[in-house]
Amino acid sequence: MCRPARPAARPSPVRRPRQVHHPPVRLPRAMLFGLGLLVCGCAFARAPAMTDPTTPVGQITLRSADGPLLGLRMANGVSAFRGVPYRARPARFERAGPPEPWTHTRDARAPGPACPQAPQPPFTVQSEDCLSLDVWTPDPAGRRPVIVFLHAGGWTHGGTRDPRLNGARLARQADAVVITLNHRLGALGWSRIDHRGGAADAVNLGLLDLTDALFWVRRHVAAFGGDPGNVTIAGASSGAEAVIALMTFPPARGAFQQALAMSGAGARLRFPNHAARVTDALMAAAGVGDLDALRRLPVERLIAAQQTLTEGALLGDGLFGPVVIDRLNRLPHSAMAEGRGKAVPLLLGTTRHEARALLIEVPLSSWLTPSRLFEALPGLFSALGRPTEAIAEVYDRALPDASANEQALAMVTDALFRMPAIRLAETRAEAGGRTFVYRFDWHPRSQDEPVGAMHGVDVVALFGSRWPGIADRVPVGVSGALWHAVGRFVRGGAPGEGWPAYTRARRAVRLFDRAPRTVLDPEKARRRLWTALPFDGTAPVMIPAAPRS
């Protein structure tokens, strides 16, 4: 990012949290034909360099409820205030308290440190004092809708330092205040410790961080030009899974009015026994015998132990994340079937070729075929109640020009993303909730672009950012159609005319391509194939089975 053309005198030095600078390393991944890399947003694991066309051209001072902030003014008129604390440094495995107010001008021109995770660019600057957020506002004197966006990363990595989540363009195009944030990850955010002597409510701390951030928004966003009574919570992949969980999480009730979930539908949560076994395995890998020792363990050793688990797991991304326990006492689909969260309109989408992200993350996935997939996941496909030959025939007919590899990846897309989203939309419709479903289809049409509309490309289109080599040529018209729909949705809970809510009777889906259009029940044969599976958080089983407690 370029510096301002005329930088003002720097404010008095501010106290920064202790930061750990790690040398960049490549994080190995567990593989079952590479599926573990894709679940919950691992296509976002490594953020390539990106040139943001919104260049800082000046500075701006704003007085927030906690104290004055020095931010940046962008060339498109949007102001950015970054690294703003929404909670104080948390004690390990405890809920964080509110930040201390300040009287000096706090430097808010750069993002705060990332929460501890496997160090790799752009997340090499880390600290446990990481609960901060970035605010992008078209006008601090206005009163605009607010979009709070939760990053992807499989519950173990990610944060506001990802340059693809620069909110300047989205804030201008949607005419909304855009907020991105950090929350605790991996073992620090998602460990179950009550069976080891920890407090019973010291679970789902990552979800409580997100809840605390939402209530910070309610109290503070007016100073940034946002409307505290019109907040949309949005997220991608694991961030989308968190959105769905928050819609049924009692502590977050009333904190937002709309929800946007991109490539995540609340179908991958953990049961208590499984979460307890993960904690026990973490302690063994760290070489500690009790919770007090785990609290005192240097964070670098804790993350190393976490990496040991994820590298050796069948699906590493299934080890951490929300636990169905305590205040998150129901699977989201079950709670929504009873009407919980039905008053919150939901914009819910996937990309057409989600699983082709594997072609980038794991070259071995190019050898994946339907027959190899049937061998790898026999339990999943036997649950469909059809011979594997009949399953393969459905995809042969639906994708006659596709290779065997493309057909296998389409099966993975359906099982992990598309069908959970459809099942959630059906559940909400039957309970009286409104869900607007989309599929992002745009992708380069040349033969040297095998990834198609892969996992995460719709997020790049939404933010108007670049993903060099992947999605650096999304046409302005495609992003513009998405901006228009989201802008309408955050203002009135509906994305516009010609896009009705999803029901079993109509199954309306908006397709975003060069010419966006609404179609009824796209890929009907593929959808009907998966009818036998509920995709409600219990099936398909993509992590080792854990009995319910």
Image (cartoon, rainbow, N blue to C red):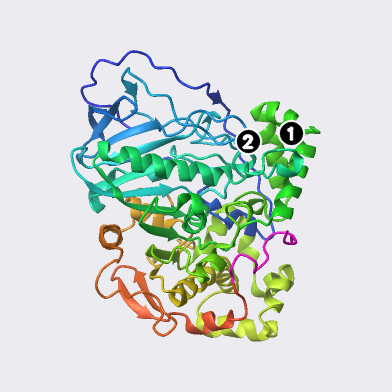
Q: Residues within 10 Å of mark 1 (few under 14, many from 20)?
A: some
Q: Earlier in the sequence, mark 1 or mark 2?
A: 2
Q: Residue at x 26, y 44 (%)?
A: 226
Q: Residue at x 55, y 51 (%)?
A: 42
Task: Residue 392 in the image: state x and y as whole percent.
Answer: 62, 81
Amino acid at the residue labelled 2: Phe
Residue 115 within the segment the image draws in magenta: no
Q: Are marks 1 and 2 in contact (CB under 8 Å)?
A: yes
Q: Disc number at residue 398?
A: none
Task: Residue 53 in the image: state x and y as whole percent.
Answer: 28, 42
Q: Residue at x 55, y 71 (%)?
A: 414
Quarter of the image for the N terminus: give it. top left
Q: Residues within 10 Å of mark 2 (few under 14, many from 20)?
A: many
Residue behind mark 1: 291
Residue 541 within the segment the image draws in magenta: yes
Quarter of the image for the C terminus: give it. bottom right
* Quarter of the image where one finds residue 366: bottom right
Could you tell me how many numbered marks the image carries? 2
In the image shown, does 534 or 378 lie closer to the viewer? 534
Q: Residue at x 57, y 84 (%)?
A: 394
Task: Residue 350 in the image: state x and y as whole percent.
Answer: 45, 65
What range of the chain is rendered magenta?
A: 535-549
Identity of the residue furthest to the top in this view: 12
Left or right: 480, with 419 as reference point: left
Residue behind mark 2: 93
Left or right: 399, with 373 as reference point: left
Q: What whole-number distance in Å separates the C-alpha atoms at marks 1 and 2?
A: 10 Å
Q: Is residue 466 visible?
A: no
Determine whether the residue tagged by mark 2 lies in a helix, strand or loop: loop
Amino acid at the residue labelled 1: Leu
